Amino acid sequence: MEFLMALVVGVFFAVSIYFMLSKKLLKVVFGTLLISHAANLMLLTSGGLKGEKAPILSDGSTLSYADPIPQALILTAIVIGFGVTAFILVLTCRLYKTFATDDLSILRGEANEK
Amino acid sequence: MNSLILKTVATPVLYLIVSFSVYVFFRGHNNPGGGFIAGLLTAGAFVLQYLSFDSKTVKSNFSLNWKKLIPVGLILALGSGLGGMILGYPFLSHSFGCFYLPLIGELELATAIIFDLGVYFVVLGTALTIISVIGGKD
Amino acid sequence: MTIVISPFVFGLIVLPFLHKIKLRFHKWVGIVPLVLFLTILKYKSSIINGNIVSEAYQWVPSFDVSLSFRLDGLSFIFALIITGIGFLVVIYSKKYMHSESAISRYFSYILLFMSSMLGVVLSNNLISLFVFWELTSISSYLLIGFWFYKEKSRYGAWKALLITAGGGLAMLAGFILMYTVTGSFEISQILSQKELIKSSPFYLTILVLTLIGSFTKSAQFPFHVWLPDAMEAPTPVSAYLHSATMVKAGIYLLARLNPVLGGSSYWFYMVTFTGILTMCYGSIMAIRQRDLKALLAFSTISQLGLITSLLGVSTETAVIGAVFHIINHAAFKGSLFMVTGIIDHEAGTRNLDELGGLGRKMPFTAVVALIGALAMAGIPPLNGFISKELFFEAVLVDGWAGYVLPALAVFGSIFTFIYSMIFVISPFLGTYKPKEKTVHEAPWGLLLSPMILGVTNLALGIYPKLVADIISKGAANILGKYVDAHLSLWHGFNVPLLMSLIVISFGCLLFSRLNYVKHIIEKIQMKKINLNKLYDLFQTGIPKFAGFITEKQMTGFLRDYLVYILSFVFLSVGLTSLFFMELSIPNLNLERIDVYEYVVAAIMVVSSIFLLFTRKRLIAILILGVIGYMVSLFFVLEKAPDLALTQLIVETITLVLFLIAFPHLPEITEENSKRSTKIINAAVSILTGLTVTFLMVYSKAYKIYESVSSYYIDNSLLLGGGKNIVNVILVDFRGFDTMGEITVLGIAAFSVYALIKLRLGGRKYE
């Protein structure tokens, strides 16, 4: 399972980075959204998959728990990811409205601008 | 969106989801749930409102200023941490201290819930500030 | 402690304060060094009895850094020089700088320096020694640049700071290595573990790094280039810092660490030969200088070389010679600098071509100069003669070095003799040259200090037993064993005396052919690489290079930053792990994968690849939604109910968000990038993806540490009072993190609010 997830995460990373390298701001937004998924999956996988039950204590069971630490990390990461996504989404809208372009190479300004 | 069904259902569902989220919030310490999830659930209920009605109607129906929930939540969370400090424990220590004294174990639970309530308010406030601001733009 | 701190307090707090309230305390500032001098002198009998005065204060106990001080024979000698010369310099400066309006600032700096220098020689902790060491560099910087409106002052100050502070950093690295070997920063403890350091594999590294620090400070070849430029400082400063004290900090370090680092052949060859080459180089260069101060600067370089080479030899004779010469050099060079200051002050120039015949106008100055110069040249009955004899005796070592060293020593001393003669003969004898006609004898305020030093020179020459006991103690601290110094003017007919005679006779001979000698030196000089040019090249080249790199890297374009960062990640993490890890395929456990897991993974992969090729915004948003829901499904499969719930709701709200914002979003349009850019982009993303996959597979295979999760699993109910471990971690164990995270969330919300509601300066676009 870890191997399968490694492949998925690798594909996610590749795709999201390709998006983030793009000149189009909207694609960068998509890239960030996807890369946070990738990072979450990577965290969860690195803690070890195939836990036998959820990390909620119960008496008398001998099944192994899924690793709670990545889960706690990811939970906040998801919510923060939401905040970040919303922010750059709004930023994109506003930039697009103000400058009528979402091309980063144009938004960057003149080459000799310091 | 002008779906009559949605408009009719949205408000009862709102109360349903909100009460469910309160339930999720309180079971959070021992079962799946907690401040983050409950906050997002409540936010989801209000998002349904924004989808069903235009933002002016929502504003007149619920005269709530979502932004204010964020500082309120932060202060709650901070206060729960400072409370421990007054008693001489490190910042944000809900548990330590109390577990040497099993008699007031319940008190400990209460402080952790205050913190979680802070989380709830911040998450709710954030989600709804963003949604209402974007939705109310036009 | 009080000794070190008091000039600091006076310099940095009292003086500026008194200056503000118009009290002219600087007239009485000499009291500070005088009191300190007497306080230190009080310890003399105790030091000679072999006692060590020490005092310690905690500073950073967790790193074994303390403010600990220790006064032994060696520190005692240095402390006396620092306060004694300091006192004389302050008296001299009062007259010399009297027309200077910023005189309070000047004395502040001098006292700051005095404090730091005392700190260097009294510290018993390598780190506090380093701190004081750098403080001397800083105060030297301030003092060289005292006349900051002069371009050359700024250049000299900056150069001195860069070179000495750079060397200081190397030295710090050496100190830290010493700490890793011995486990202590306390000098007294390190000195007791010399075998440990000498047998350590780091010995050579420690030695080289420490030597760099010491050589830069003491202006040894090839780091000497800063000292001549430092002569832009006011002359009393040059007398104090750049001949008597600060440049001797490097010597002090060599002496202090001699028991630990010395005694090996590395030490012998590196230190002795650097020293003796510096001595020859400095004395030759001194001859061709036209400026009296430049002459003295090169002479200082040369004399420091002499002391360094003595410490390199580090036999008993050599060390006694070194300690004695440290005192002598401070005395005669101090007086000579002060004489230069007097000449500059009275005749208005320091240029040898414009000076001459001053002897009749200023007889006292001439006598002081004569005494100083004769001491420098090593003529009996002055103190310089005795230390030079010891020097000659010390360089007569066994082996081939026993031929080379004495030859170089005599060679360098001949030139020393010549420049000493130049110093005394050119300005004072011959025809009267200065343009200024009204040159007269200097006032007593200026003459007093050099005269005291001149008398010291004579006294130490005729009756060296005056300091013999204290020199023995200093030498004993350097060698780490008992030493009894017998100093006397007359040693009998022996090889050193013969060498002195050779020096004097050849010196006289060459001095009479001075122009011819200078001509030859000029010719050799032309062919040499110019070290100053090298420094200038560094100074202008490095910012240029940095600018070039910054220009290339900081393009202000997100893509470029990412490409740089990710390529680096690939090169550092991906490639190195490929090269250095065993490439065995770990157990993939493919049989443990269920069918629905394959399905979820396949949907995620296919939809993300589909996302690459879609041209419609709406479809892209929906695909992202699909991926998000698949991720939450995956969380369900992996027994993470909290995550699944959260992800589900967040995904829904995000989707709504995208749809609400949809009308305002830009279209996905064709990119007009170059083909090569696209290929690089694709390559970077694929390589990063591969690196990540690779790392994940291998991190599974190599588990080095135990997981910390079990702590949380075991203690969740016990300490956190909850059964949902994830929630307990969030609100309790890692509550502080969560606190930070919700703060970030709040900030994000307000930023969104601000972006939409506030129209700060953006109005003109609408």
Image (cartoon, helix red, strand yellow):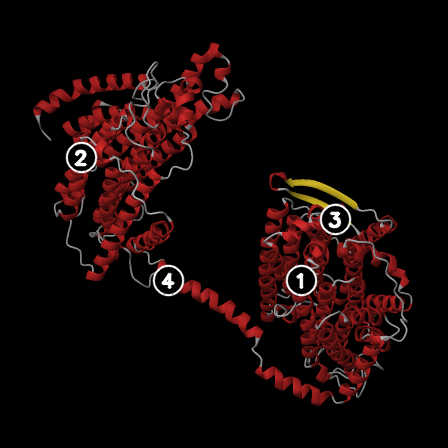
Q: Are marks 1 and 3 in contact (CB under 8 Å)?
A: no
First in sequence: mark 1 or mark 3?
3
Mark 4 vs mark 2: give the one in front. 2
Mark 3 vs mark 4: give the one in front. 4
Q: Which residue is mark 2?
A: C598
Q: How far is the residue under mark 1 from the one under mark 2?
A: 69 Å
Q: Residues within 10 Å of mark 2 (few under 14, many from 20)?
A: some
Which disc is residue C551 wearing? 4
Marks 4 & 2 on one chain:
yes
Element class at badge 4: helix
Q: Residues within 10 Å of mark 3 (few under 14, many from 20)?
A: some
In front: A14, or C477? C477
In front: C225, or A113? C225
- The image quarter containing residue C649 is top left
Above/below status of C241 relative to B80: below
Query: What's the amino acid at mark 3?
Result: Ser
First in sequence: mark 3 or mark 4?
3
Which disc is residue C236 wearing? none
Q: Which residue is mark 3?
A: C6
Which disc is residue C267 wearing? 1
First in sequence: mark 2 or mark 3?
3
Element class at badge 2: helix
Residue under mark 3: which chain is it in? C
Residue C408 pos. (x, y %):
72, 76
Query: What's the amino acid at mark 4?
Result: Glu
Residue C690 pos. (x, y %):
27, 48
Q: How far is the residue under mark 2 from the one under mark 3?
A: 77 Å
Q: Are marks 3 and 4 in contact (CB under 8 Å)?
A: no
Q: How far is the residue under mark 4 from the one under mark 2?
A: 47 Å
Q: Residues within 10 Å of mark 1 (few under 14, many from 20)?
A: many
Marks 2 & 3 on one chain:
yes
